[in-house]
Image (cartoon, helix red, strand yellow):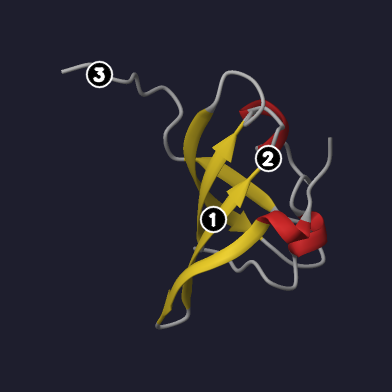
Amino acid sequence: MAFRARNLSVLAYANGFTLWHYITEDTGAAATADGYFDAACEMLRVGDVLVANLDADGDADTALLAVRTSGEEGVRVRDLTAGTQPTDG
């Protein structure tokens, strides 16, 4: 699949920082690939964070994605939750 702008929405905005929510049927690997969010380059800013619900139609997962670059060079994100393991208490 590809990025869908209608699935991206603002959760909070303060002091030039935006917290976003994004839901997709794509996997984490697809959503964190360079260029996946390029169509949103005019909305996303470096330092913004996305709460991403991934693989919504399969093995659902949630990740925090930090915007590393945005603009003419495209959008790159970093998965802040990569390498973490869920705990079952």
- Find the distance from the CA under tag 1 to the CA under tag 2: 10 Å
Q: Mark 1 to mark 3: distance in Å?
A: 23 Å
- Residue corresponding to mark 3: 87
* Residue at which label 2 appears: 24
Q: Is residue 8 above or below residue 54?
A: below
Seen from the viewer's position, the closer of residues 16 and 11 is 11
Which residue sits at x=54%, y=44%? Answer: 52
Indicate the position of residue 44 as horizontal and vertical percent values. 64, 66
The amino acid beneath tag 1 is His
Query: What residue is shown at x 32% (from left), y 20% (from top)?
Result: 86
Tell me where residue 60 appears, x and y as whole percent: 55, 26
* Mark 3 neighbour class, 10 Å CA radius: few under 14, some 14 to 19, many 20 or more: few
Distance of label 3 from label 2 (alpha carbons): 24 Å
Does 76 appear above or below 58? below
User: Which residue is the extreme one toward the left?
Assistant: 89
Say which residue label 1 marks. 21
